[in-house]
Image (spheres, helix red, strand yellow):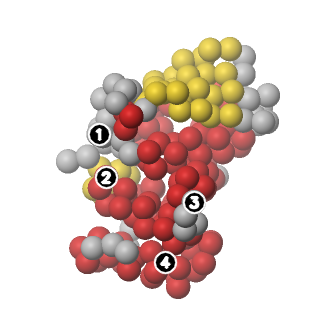
Amino acid sequence: MPSVGGNILLARYAFVKAKGGDPLWQRVLSHLPAEDQRLLRRTLLVTSSYPLELNLRLDEAIAREVHPGEPERAFLEMGRSSAEVNLRGPHKPFLRHADPHYLLSFTEMIYAYYYNEGRRTYEKTGPTSATLTTHDAPPATPGDCLTVVGWHQRAIELSGGKNVKVVESRCRSKGHTVCEYRCSWE
């Protein structure tokens, strides 16, 4: 069964709490099935794995509450927040000031911290550009892919990149065999 690391759910929890505290978290949970609510009310552990489907339902519920009518904005913000939480915390060793390629060179390892199926590769395409490609992963959703875009935007910024652009040029949710993200910065 496809699963995600607890670091993703903990980052989503931190995102919601920062936006509106416990009242917002309770509203988000109210959109979810009872079993999801039960799991999310327990202590979430960074070292545990959780069903990918739970994460996808949680993201949809957060988007509905945080930015009604603007889900794309919510998904990008969730991804950015996840990068902020994880790269300023347990994944800080992946950052090197003024060197986004250093961070991106760990793409496959970082992916494995988040997901138990599939892999993501990194290709340096220039001094300030790279392509990331997700292979053999569970089916993607447009929202999940936007969280990946947001995560990499913020990660590259935290590595010193300016005017960062991350564009998904191919997406499994649109019928492609891979998800491909073209990254550039100054």
Which label's residue is closer to the chain start, 3 or 4?
A: 4
**Residue 2: x, y in percent?**
26, 46
- Residue at figure coordinates x 66%, y 45% from the top left: 154
The residue sitting at the top extreme is 126
Q: Are marks 2 and 3 in contact (CB under 8 Å)?
A: no
Residue occupied by mark 1: 138
The image quadrant of residue 58 is bottom left
* In the rendered image, the vertical position of residue 51 relative to residue 91, given as above or below: below
Q: What element carries label 3?
A: loop
Q: Is residue 106 visible?
A: no
Question: Which callout, 2 or 3, points to the residue nearer the camera?
Answer: 3
Residue occupied by mark 3: 70
**Residue 52: x, y in percent?**
31, 52
- Residue at figure coordinates x 33%, y 72% from the top left: 32
* In the rendered image, the vertical position of residue 167 relative to residue 144, given as above or below: above
Which label's residue is closer to the chain start, 2 or 3?
A: 2
Q: What element carries label 4?
A: helix
Whole-angstrom CA distance, mark 3 to mark 4, is 18 Å
Residue sitting nearer the eye, 157 or 150: 150
Residue sitting nearer the eye, 119 or 169: 169
Q: Do the residues labelled 2 and 1 touch (CB within 8 Å)?
A: yes
- Tell me which amino acid carries mark 4: Trp
Residue occupied by mark 4: 25
Q: Are marks 1 and 4 in contact (CB under 8 Å)?
A: no
The image quadrant of residue 77 is bottom right
Whole-angstrom CA distance, mark 2 to mark 3, is 23 Å
- Tell me which amino acid carries mark 3: Glu
Residue occupied by mark 2: 52
